[in-house]
Amino acid sequence: MKYRLFGLGLKGKSPVVSAQHRINCYIEKIIDEGTEQTSIIASAGMDLFVGTLGATPCRGWIAVDNLLYVVHRGTLYSITNAGVTTSRGALSTTTGRVDMTHDGAVILIVDGTAGYTYTIASTTFAVIADPDFPNGATTCTWQDGNFVVEDGMNFNISPDGTNWDPLDVATAESAPDGIVRVISDHGQIVLFGVDTTEFWGNTGAADFSYQPIRGATREVGLAARWSLAQTDDSLTFLGKSKQGQVQVMRLDGYTPRPVSSPEFDSIINGYATVSDATGYAYMWNGHPMYRLNFPSAGKSWELDAMSGVFCERQSGLSGGRHRGEMAIDFINKIRIADYENGNIYTVNASTYDENGTSFPVELTSRRVIGDYDPISLSRLFIDFETGVGLATGQGSNPQVMLQISRDGGRTFENEVWKTLGAVGKYKTRAEWYQLGTADSFVFRVRITDPIKRVMVNGGLLE
């Protein structure tokens, strides 16, 4: 019988609820002649774009026209499409995230200690000397002709980033929870606090022109400053209600709506620390992706906003978080900054490793349960795209591993490997026989060879 072994569930509270799990893949649904087919596609690999910045991670970046501007340690660099780096100025700090924004002519940088401007046409870098600039500014944005910064309590505006009027300042008004991050979205300033989110609009007044939008404030705060990302024409972030639970949320107009499931919420609320979470977004083959890293927990998760499904992301074969810390679209290619060093990568659909390091694709199935009696399975087959092995080296004889659980996904038996076919062997099929008898079965498959990995579920015979 044909069977959808791999669904959309996720193991959270208990394997009795669901034993399903996915690593380094996403789900694509195709409707053909009235029937729906679900395929599971491996996440793309990464090629090295820039590997000369150093041993510490990039602190922030922004793309303007045909240059990528990156802060690494205490230096602002410009990077060309060919990966050529040029030093553009020196910051007074060397560690910690920076935030960057621009108006097309000037780039503004804040690092929590000082502010800096870089004038693109004249290639002039300068420390903001105006004594009215809030040197504690940690995040910034540009909105409706003004640079906007926040220092944890207030937000200030400036038309040029250099001159700051001491009267052009306001305080979040709805609650005394401070400001965690400021960002512009849909023509308004959004002020994320610890417990609330406020929206301010430009009234056009001669003096300070921004006013809070009455009735728009929401009782949800930002649980991790750097988890916020603009995703598919909205904002996605790790939010926290006043009741204390963190969830992945997305703004729908003025309303933060959870996009994570109770099972996923159970996983992340079990982490000891979530305030250091970082997030970024990118579009991949029509799928809006939101990546969420938990450094203290050593975990990375990715939400495909098209399917609403979360998948764990890993780099290398030993588990742990993914290498990606930040993402940006630079000259129509997705660039990824490493969390551990200054490497910058390019996401590539035709690359099946990460800068030469293999990564796994792993799937844990639904539970297959008999009707009140044990069931015996004589055959399992899973349909992969086969015959896509490499000409030489690892992947020339690609393999897929199967493990079986007979206790609902709590423990798994020994690995059994089958070939996916050398290059050109398109009629190869991954099949396992004489699977035995059990009250329930859960199957886990894993591929580590650096080849194209596409799967379209499978079938079982009793």
Image: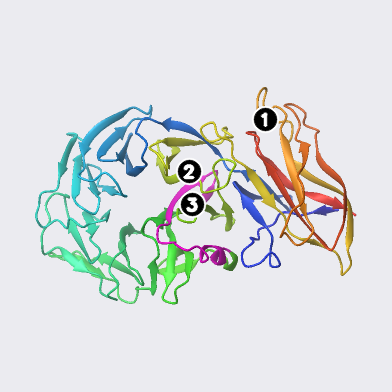
* Residue at x-position 11% and y-position 58%: 132
The residue segment tinted magenta is 264-289
Residue matched to label 1: 395
Tell me the CA gap for discs 3 and 2: 11 Å
Q: Amino acid at mark 2?
A: Arg
**Mark 3 residue type:** Arg
Q: Are marks 2 and 1 in contact (CB under 8 Å)?
A: no
Q: Amino acid at mark 1?
A: Gly
Instruction: State whether residue 385 appears in this view.
Output: no
Q: Earlier in the sequence, mark 3 or mark 2?
A: 3
Residue 275 shown in magenta: yes
Residue 17 in view here:
yes
Q: Give the residue at x 12% y 56%.
A: 164
Q: Quadrant of residue 144?
A: bottom left
Question: For the C terminus, which image quadrant?
Answer: bottom right
Residue 141, how many percent across, how many down? 28, 54
Check disc 2 and report its element: helix, strand or loop.
loop
Q: Is residue 350 above or below residue 233?
A: above
Residue 145: x %, y % from top left: 22, 53
> What x and y, as percent, mark residue 85?
31, 29
Task: Give left or right: position of 456 versus 116.
Answer: right
Pointer 1 local density, CA inside 10 Å: few below 14, some 14–19, many at least 20: many
* Residue closest to the eye, 231 or 75: 75
Give whichever of discs 2 and 1 has the lower sequence position.
2
Q: In the rendered image, which residue does mark 2 sit on?
A: 323
Q: Which residue is mark 3?
A: 291
